[in-house]
Image: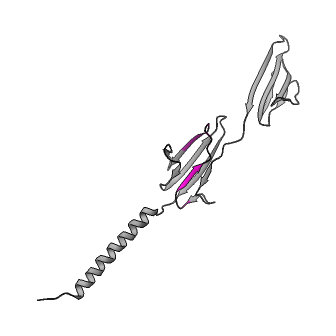
Amino acid sequence: VNYSMPEGFRITKATLDGTEIEYSRKFVDMAREGHYVISYECSKAEIPYTLDVNVDTTPPTLVIEGVDEDGKARGPVAITGKVDQDTLVVTRNGEEYSTMLSKVLTQSGRYEAIVTDPAGNSTTYRFTILIYLDKNAWIFSALFMVVVITVVGLFIYFRKHLRVR
């Protein structure tokens, strides 16, 4: 968050986003984000040098839809809000999980989504998708119950109408 000169060097000019900022001969405060250009020179040789650097300390963010305040989801989870330059790595139960085709996670497990920007800042999101029944599971359950009720009904019908000859 600062730039200090070694012995024998001195700062001659410092700017932040094109505006001159305060500095001393040996020190520049670089706590704010932006584009810094710092000119300095070797006192004995009078050779000029320039430091041109962008300071970025803001971590990237994602939007995780479907997760409650406790970090639990009872259905699919959608990951949105990733900027093109950012890198997203998702792990499920400790193993890398591919999100190339879809950013919607449907399998139950413990997830960790780490988004990193080009400056090296990163943010980690941890959440758990609990076991849940989706639309297909409800349809299967309903059909299974119809089959069970039909079999039990037929069993009772044939038992009451059993004729011994």
Vertically, is 161 above or below 86? below
Q: Is residue 154 magenta?
A: no
Image quarter of residue 3: top right
Q: Nearer the viewer, residue 86 or 22?
A: 86
Number of marks in the image?
0
Q: Quadrant of residue 21?
A: top right
87 in relation to 150, above or below: above
Viewport quadrant of the N terminus = top right
Residue 149 image position (x, y, % from top left): 33, 77
On the image, the x and y values in percent for residue 72 come to: 57, 59
In the rendered view, tell whether residue 64 sits above or below residue 23.
below
Report the span colored magenta.
Answer: 73-89
Residue at image location 65% in from the left, 46% down from the top: 61
Q: In this orientation, which residue lies closer to the viewer: 59 or 162?
A: 162
Q: Quadrant of residue 120?
A: top right
> Which of the image's four quarters has the C terminus?
bottom left
Q: Residue furthest top?
A: 45
Q: Is residue 99 left or right of residue 56?
A: left
Q: Is residue 87 magenta?
A: yes
The way the protein has been coloured in the rendering is: one colour
Q: Residue at x 26, y 84 (%)?
A: 157
| Residue 127 place in picture, x, y as percent | 57, 54
User: Going 31% across and 77% down the picture, which residue do you hit?
Assistant: 150
Compared across the picture, whether 152 is left or right of 138 comes to: left
- Image x and y of residue 101, in percent: 48, 45
